[in-house]
Image (cartoon, helix red, strand yellow):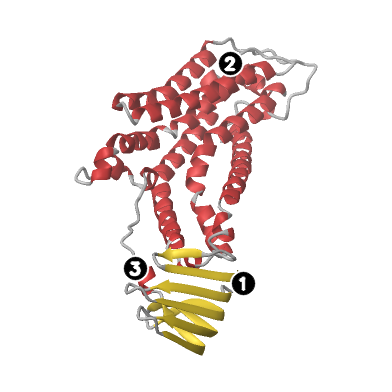
Amino acid sequence: MRLIDRYLLRQLLGPVVLATLALTAVALLSQSLAGLDLIVNQRQSALVFLKVTLLYMPQLINLILPIAVFVAALVALNRLHTEQEIVVCFAGGMSRWRVISPAMRLACTIAFLALVMNLFVQPASFRTLRQELFQVRTDLAATLVREGEFTEPAPGLTVYAQSVNSQGDLQNLFIHQIKADGGTTTYTAESGRVGRAQGRPVLFMRKGTNQEFSSRGVLNYLTFDEYIFDLEPLASTDELIHYKPSDRYLHELFFPDLQQDWERRNRLELLAEGHARIASPLYNIAFMALALNAIIGGGFSRLGYGRRIAIVGATAAGVRLLGFLFQSGAEDEVWLNLGQYLTPLAATWIALAQIFRGKINRHIDITRRPANLAPYVGARA
């Protein structure tokens, strides 16, 4: 790679990395606020909350990358053009393709990395995420008791705890159970804790009373220092983990098991998701081409390129929105999947066509001193 190519590539790579990190941080902050329910209502640890938040990252990064590429490319290219470094490249005899090739190679590399994340990293992380959320949803310690509320975790069972401390201990516990024969049992305890005994989930209750009223009208009353309440009937469930289209690998999207009722009914949705996994990385190339068109596609301007950037920015937003519309429509009409590929490819072709059709400005404004780029023109690695 020529020295000038490496210079242009470095000027683009830094802003792309910084923009990706900044936008990812903002997206993670938004996602973490939405996931606070795990700590507030489900009483999960901060480690579980962090794990769930990080498992969303592959999908967030894939959504953010085209925007980061577009914004970073505009910033870097605008600086290079206003300081006449790109003009120096043209004046030194470099062709249009030589000038834009570092940016396009960077966009193709990012698109390849995005494709790898779409095909392998995202489904692996989302499957782990789905399993983690399933464990949270079936966590007895979280579903059995809500602080200060009467809950019914099972038919005929009412549970109340005045408070739950940070260690998971239940304070001033009340349990009322209606038996199948019509009898009732009421437990009260100063404290309790969900645990396991002999491999079975149980509730350890300390310093309490047991009042049992049989169907024959007999009342039995006793006090205890410690009592073990069996939670095995509550733990047994026939619920299975259901993987959504975003959790599935590419072969599962294109070749679903049509013997399964859900997959047969949602075959088009799975197919649309599969095509979106392949097509979405192309937006990195399209947005880079649009950014190049905004800066290099027209003549040099000392007043800046605000109007051009605004037009191209609106165009980029419209292109991405159109891609989402094609993906949504493909869930009902399979032929619309073609639009998922044509949208970014058409945007790339139109942007590059305008760049190569425009007039090259080889005039250097001597009133402005270009950056130290001239010594690199024509140099080779």
Residue 352 visible in the picture: yes
- The answer to whether 262 appears left or right of 210 in the picture is left
* SS class, disc 3: loop
- Closer to the chain start, of discs 2 and 1, is 1
Label 1 belongs to which residue?
165
Q: Quote the CA–CA distance across marks 2 and 3.
A: 65 Å
Residue 140 position, x and y percent, is 45, 68
On screen, 193 above or below 126? below
- Closer to the chain start, of discs 3 and 1, is 1
Residue closest to the far front = 217
Q: Quote the CA–CA distance across marks 3 and 1.
A: 26 Å
Number of numbered callouts drawn: 3
> Please, what is the three-letter code of the amino acid marked with disc 3?
Ser
- The answer to whether 321 appears left or right of 367 in the picture is left
Residue 237 position, x and y percent, is 33, 64
Q: Residue at x 47, y 82 (%)?
A: 211
Residue closest to the far left = 259
Residue 21 position, x and y percent, is 61, 44
Q: Nearer the viewer, residue 116 or 316?
A: 316
> Please, what is the three-letter code of the amino acid marked with disc 2?
Gly
Label 3 belongs to which residue?
236
Label 2 belongs to which residue?
297
Q: Nearer the viewer, residue 351 or 274?
A: 274
* SS class, disc 1: loop
